[in-house]
Image (cartoon, helix red, strand yellow):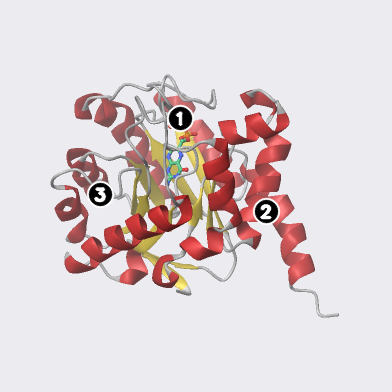
Amino acid sequence: MSFLHCGPYRLSLQRPLLMGIVNMTPDSFSGDGLGGDVDRAIAHARLQREAGADLLDLGAESTRPGALPTTADEELRRLLPVLEEVTAWGIPISVDTCKPTVMRAALAAGAAMINDITALGAPGALAAVADSDCAVCLMHMQGEPRTMQAAPFYADVVGEVSAFLTAAADRCRQAGIADERLVVDPGFGFGKTLAHNLALFRHLTAIAVDGLPLLAGVSRKSMLGAITGQPVAERLAASVAAAVLAAQKGARILRVHDVAATRDALAVWTAIEQGEA
Ligand code: HH2
């Protein structure tokens, strides 16, 4: 796939795109949650855009391990005022949600992409996005955030994640969603041990379902803490290294907290990759 159809936008996938995270949760694992503070969320989104984000991912429900679900009303109360402002900026806005009501409201407010950690698994989720022209990110998760890290188990993590994403993409196609609108994501840290995450990373290329673009979200995650021994606030270097390696292994969208640093690192990688001699 050489481009992603994303609402009114057509995003070239010739180079990896940077998805800047804007967490409007009070309890985000990364510590950057902005709660219900609309002005701070908009200011943070503006910084992400100015730092070079190609798209922004707005999330109003925390998915960190152990997180309790948020109601749709609460999610919309955090999300909509920010969404109404940032959709006017001329940059595609993704909304990180698994609730069909939130999806519909977000699309009506101008969101160009739905990023669903449950791969449109909720009843009504497929129908909520099918009639629009938004892009859809289908992510793999074993279990649910509240309990997913208790005892993740796979006989063949790469094969199982890949089969799950293939089936999720097929369901979308049957509902009339074109491949140009689809993105797949192995879901680093979602019901996976460090060994599972590393195996998925190592074999990232094998997870690309039918050539659909891959999204990788490793920024500040605990797998990087386990490798480096660093707390969340000190995982910038590890996050940037992981983002570049994910790009090298074929990821086309990198979901990151630290856009400016990742952009510079990718620029170095791109310059070397595209050199002639
Ligand atoms: N990771 C998080 C949330 N949403 N979406 C996709 N597609 N892929 C991911 O890897 C992914 C995601 C968790 O990160 P974050 O948003 O920073 O934390 P929290 O959910 O605690 O707010």
Disc 2: which residue: 244
Q: Position of residue 261 (x, y in %)?
A: 70, 44
Q: Circles 3 and 1: CB distance less than 8 Å?
A: no
Q: Quadrant of ligand 1?
A: top left
Q: Position of residue 179 (x, y in %)?
A: 33, 70
Q: Circles 2 and 3: CB distance less than 8 Å?
A: no
- Where is 256 relative to 227, above or below? below
Q: Quadrant of the N terminus?
A: bottom left
Q: Position of residue 220 (x, y in %)?
A: 60, 34
> Given the image, on which type of amino acid does mark 2 rest?
Val
Q: Quadrant of the C terminus?
A: bottom right
- Left or right of 234? Residue 65 is left
Of circles 3 and 1, which is in front? 3
> Given the image, on which type of amino acid does mark 1 rest?
Ala
Disc 3: which residue: 120
Q: Position of residue 236 (x, y in %)?
A: 69, 35
Residue at the spot 69% in from the left edge and 56% down from the top edge:
266
Task: Please state which of residues 62 and 93 is positioned toward the viewer in this rendering.
Answer: 62
